[in-house]
Structure formats: structure tokens, C-alpha cells
Amino acid sequence: MRASYLLAIDQQASVHTSNNVLLRPYTPYGYQGGKGCPLLAFAGEAGALLPQGYLLGNGKRAYQTGTMRFHSPDVFSPFGRGGLNAYAYCTGDPVNKVDRDGHSPTRVVGQATGLVWGTVGMLSSLNKASKAIVKRSIAKANGTPIPKEFNNSSRTNNAMIFVGGLAGTVVKAPSAVFSFSAPFESVGAELMTGAGIAASSLAGVGKLRQLFNDVRSTYQEARSNRLPLGKLVLESIKEATGWNRLRGQESAVLEPLPEQVLLVRFPAMK
């Protein structure tokens, strides 16, 4: 025989009533004064394990609703995302947040998305500088007029994109690690945020793959025209960071490496 149960929950997944269970109000921090406790209670957590408390994260940390604090400190406090108060629940905002286990994978994905788009901006700026250097260098080697440099506004914008992307990449990398200690938002908000982040991540990864192909094509063209790749990377960085722009210089024009000729000597026929 199959039994069905209906649960009345709020946006935090807190169970307020169910079959044959009286309405159960909670304080913002989860305390409820009724006798007994249903299997699922505040924030959808198992409520029969501790009196007025919950074992979050599969027993990792015990949370007491009466004292509104954890029993054990957060390992990421006080210098990580755990905050200065190592015992605080939901960083003092239990209405808009739900702390399942002291970690937040949705926040991690969000940081990773920022990391991807920061890398995209950095690589796109660097590739633009590399393409211009390769194009100008090949034109000089072939004896054709050297194409004009990008105007100052375009070069400044390109440098801003590179520096911003680099800063975003550097900042987001450690943030993705520390965000493991951030509490969850409400379940509905987490789902909506996760869907948006997933779509943004997919677009970012697609753009990143396209950029890798463009960069590879640029450097293959440079190799086929015997341009020094190490110097190309260095000059591209100088141009992308705005170093040349600050010094009032144009991007470099590279000289092709000397063509190597292999001489084979055959022994004289007697």
C-alpha cells in the first residue's frame, strides 16, 4: 500500500504543515516552540535528530536554533568566506539565505563563470594585438605597404579589456575556492541563479573555445612566415597591456628569422 504525504513549505523549504500535522511557525533562525518535530522541518532539514537543532552537511556541523549559532567554528573563518564570526548562521541573514552545509556550489559556479569571462576578455585582447603584429610584419617582409596601426581609442579600449580580464581572472581564481564556505540562498533562488549561470557558462566556454582556435590560427600563420614566436608573445603583451600606447609607440614589426637551408654533401664518385 502506497501512502502519499503533502507538505506545505515556504521558499526556504521549511515544512510548516503536512498530513495530520498542526501548523508549525518558525522564528527567522528556525526555532519552533511546538512539541515534537516532523521528519523534515526548518529549511527542509531533518528535524528529529537534535532538540531544537539540526545536523547540517550530513552531520558536519551542528546548528542550534535557540542560540542561533553553530556549535563548532567554520574552518573558513575568520579570513575566508566564513566571515569574522565563525559561529554565525547564514552570516546573520537567515531570512534570505539557507545554509545547508557551509558550502555553496552555486556560488562556485558563479565564480567560475566570472573566471571564464575574464579569461575570454584577456585572450581576445591579446589575440587582437598578435593579429595586428603578424599582419604588419608579413606586409613588411613581402615588400608591401605596412597596414596602419589601430587608432588610439581602439588601442586604449583593447588595453582596458586586457587589464580588466586579467584582473578578473586573478581575483576569481581564489574566490572560486573561498566561495565553498558561502551559505545557500533560498532553494528557488538557487535554482534560478544556477540556470542563469549555466547558460552564461555555456556561452563563455563556447567563446573560449573559439578564441583558442583563433589564437592557434594566428600563431600558425606567424610560424609559417618564420616570425619569432617568443618575441611575438612579448610584443603582443606589451601592446595589449597598453605599454606601447603609454610610450607613444606603435606595435612592433617583427623581422622574419633567417631561412635555414640544409646542405647535403655526397661523396665524390670514383
Image: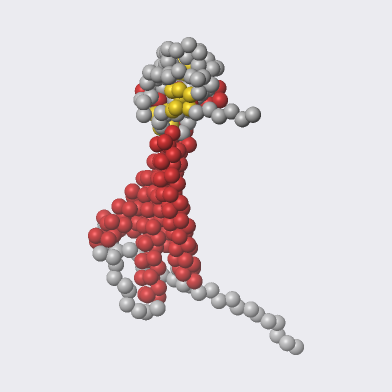
Q: Where is residue 53 in the image (x, y as percent from the top left)?
A: 48, 16
Q: Which of 162 and 108 is in front in this view?
A: 108
Quarter that holds the N terminus: top right
29, above or below 269, in the image? above
Q: Which of 14 and 90 is in front in this view?
A: 14
What residue appears at the point 46 percent right and 72 percent down from the top-left corner? 225
Residue 78 is at least partly visible in this image:
no
Q: Where is residue 139 in the image (x, y as percent from the top left)?
A: 37, 75
171, above or below 140, in the image? above
Q: Where is residue 65 in the image (x, y as percent from the top left)?
A: 43, 16
95, above or below 109, in the image? above
What residue appears at the point 41 percent right and 53 percent down from the top-left corner? 120
What residue appears at the point 39 percent right and 65 percent down from the top-left corner? 131
103, above or below 255, in the image? above
Q: Nearer the viewer, residue 222 or 195?
A: 195
Q: Where is residue 161 in the image (x, y as percent from the top left)?
A: 33, 53
* Quarter of image, res 195: top left
Quarter that holds the C terminus: bottom right
Task: Specify the farthest residue to the bottom.
Answer: 270
Task: Specify the farthest residue to the front.
Answer: 1
